[in-house]
Image: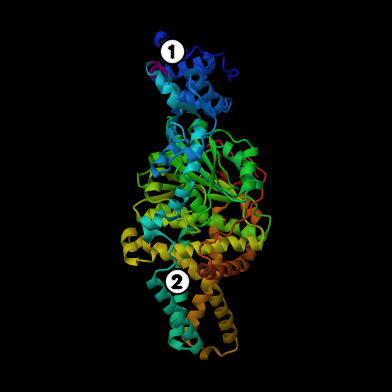
Amino acid sequence: MEAGEYRGEPNGAAWQVATARSDGGKTAAGAGFSHAFQAEALALRQLGFSKPFINNLARRARANGSTIEQELLADGSVDEQVYYAAMARLLGLPFMEEIPPDQIMDRAALDVLLQRPTILRLHAPDKAPLTAIVPEARYLADLAERLVRHPTLKAALAVASTSSLRRAVWQAGATRRVASVSNALFDENPQHSARIVMTGRQGFVAGTLLTGSAAALLLASGPVALTLHVLLSSLYFAAMILRLGALFRPRRREILPEMLIADDPLPVYSVLVALYREAPVAAQLIAALERLDWPRSRLDVKLVCEADDHDTIEAIRRLRPGPHMEIIAVPPGGPRTKPKALLYALAGARGDYLAIYDAEDRPHPGQLKEAHARFRTAAPEVACLQAPLIITNMRESCISTVFALEYAALFRALLPLLARYRMPLPLGGTSNHFRTAALRAAGGWDPYNVTEDADLGMRLYRLGYRSETIRRHTFEDAPIKAPVWVGQRTRWFKGWLQTWLVVMRDPGRARREMGTGAFIVFQLLIGGMLISSLGHPAILVFVIASAAAMLQSPAESIHPLKNLLFSVDAMNIFGSYTVFLGLGVSAMIEYERRLLGWRWLAIPVYWMMVSYAAWRAAFELKAKPFFWNKTPHEPRPVTVPATNPATATAAVDHPGATPEGGQA
């Protein structure tokens, strides 16, 4: 910017109107400007900006599909308050640095101003009503002319900045809004809400099954115990078969879709990041978001914090994030969960598309562009795209190593397979990209489900939408200590239990909405995972006990059915370990495989930890179903992933590349 300074005071609104009408729009860039650009250029010239600077902004605006004013404010070199104060002086109106929230009459319709803050009626005690306006440069001449023709309007108007008006609306509607988002899904579509943990019928069925199973085991009822054993082994085996199919899936190499699309103007893209006690990673997060390859004028970033999390809010403010980033303070009320915070912020999301990231994430700079390109070429029912998550601290502990193996299997093997066959996807909790309209139509996230991602993936599918996967990755960190891992995994299992219970409130309806094949896949994905995790210790004990008994008995005395059950259970145990390892290793690049080393031998211990977390979640679902077990994060070295399309997906499928996008 050529200093971007405000050069002197104009001689009132009438002077601006006369100038606007007399120079034919040639003040800034001549005949190449559209009518809207001409009006903006004239206004900025009156504010003292130079012609070359305005021309540069106009070129960017034309390329990005924005306005000259949007490019100016997104640039960050002009303070927004100073800019609108200068506009107020130009119009001869007072300027309000801050708008008192208590002067706003709150109502639901007010929330439209969170997305497009333009005009707001204020009611101060013992004063006439005042209207706060946010003038747009392209309409400034028309507004000035109107004030000249109706000078009495000046007493009823004041100028405010976009940020101050939006901030006041957030504060004025906080109580009403948080109550609404906490209960909206339950009030409008109770069948999709996890607010009620179990329906009466589900509670009766669960109680009957548990009582019957316990009685069978205590009374040593042979047929009943055998039936339970066969059922458990069959479900365990079915869940393993699904992953076995992913292991032997055909590999496809795809051209990145944005390579096939011209550089058309880009839409506004919203990015939501929920933060709670994340002050240590605030600087890393802001740096990662600043590297996103998307014009700032078309980027709408919401940093969503709990209102009483002062440390995180202050840590972000000290970093002075750009004007395209906004701190959203979520007031107390309802469950304190990530989905509630995201749903609260959704009211202000301006983008046609919306991405979700976690505080510790380092997304690939080109991820938004790949998602946008995929949405443009995908069918309208594709409402969500899942980016692969890659663990970068896999060598810090055995836990993080096996966690990385697990993530590779899920995000680079299983989910792409499900997407290819148009099956429902249990989304990851981050790096989800949505069509915002579809997300809102589905009701957004369930504030009461502590794995809001899996729940939303299933709900979207039931409503006729689909999810697919993209290739540009997001770097994440795995827990390295057992207590942290157990807390996180307990929350995940509790949410998966919630998701399964919600879908199974009316199995017939769910099957009709999803289709028989997808319904079966859901049972194998969620139900099979829950059963295999909860039943893993029992099957392991049976295998060990049976092996010991068989070694001490003559071969001819062993009943064929016991032989069969032992063989199936042994295959379930050792086959599940093998498929888990094979699926993860097959999805990893060579660099990751070298880091894996011999730590895969910890898989049996890891699975016992999984089982412990699953049982812990089952009990917690009864005691504190909506408790959010917070996973602490620490800052990591930030490395810029490759941005060249030829190497951008190195961490996904290019042998010899490191997870950071370089060469090993």
Secondary structure character of the magenta stretch overall: helix
Circle 1 is placed at which residue position?
A: 14
Can the viewer see residue 253 in this picture? no
When asked about the image quadrant of residue 437, the answer is: top left
For label 1, the SS is: helix
Q: Is residue 652 left or right of residue 203?
A: right
Magenta residues, start to end: 144-148
When asked about the image quadrant of residue 192, the answer is: bottom left
Disc 1 marks which amino acid? Ala
Residue at 43% x, 43% y is 106
Provide residue 356's location: percent of width, then percent of height: 50, 46
Looking at the image, which residue sits at the far top? 22
Image quadrant containing the C terminus: top right
For label 2, the SS is: helix
**Camera-side residue of 458 and 103:** 103
Provide residue 54's location: percent of width, then percent of height: 51, 18
Residue at 35% x, 44% y is 379
Instruction: Establish if 89 lies above or below 251.
Output: above
Residue 146 in the magenta stretch? The answer is: yes
Which mark is on residue 235? 2
Image quadrant containing the N terminus: top right
**Camera-side residue of 167 and 381:** 167
Residue 488 in the magenta stretch? The answer is: no
Query: Label 2, label 1: how many angstroms apart (C-alpha)?
Result: 79 Å
Instruction: Establish if 483 lies above or below 564.
Output: above
Provide residue 364's location: percent of width, then percent of height: 56, 41
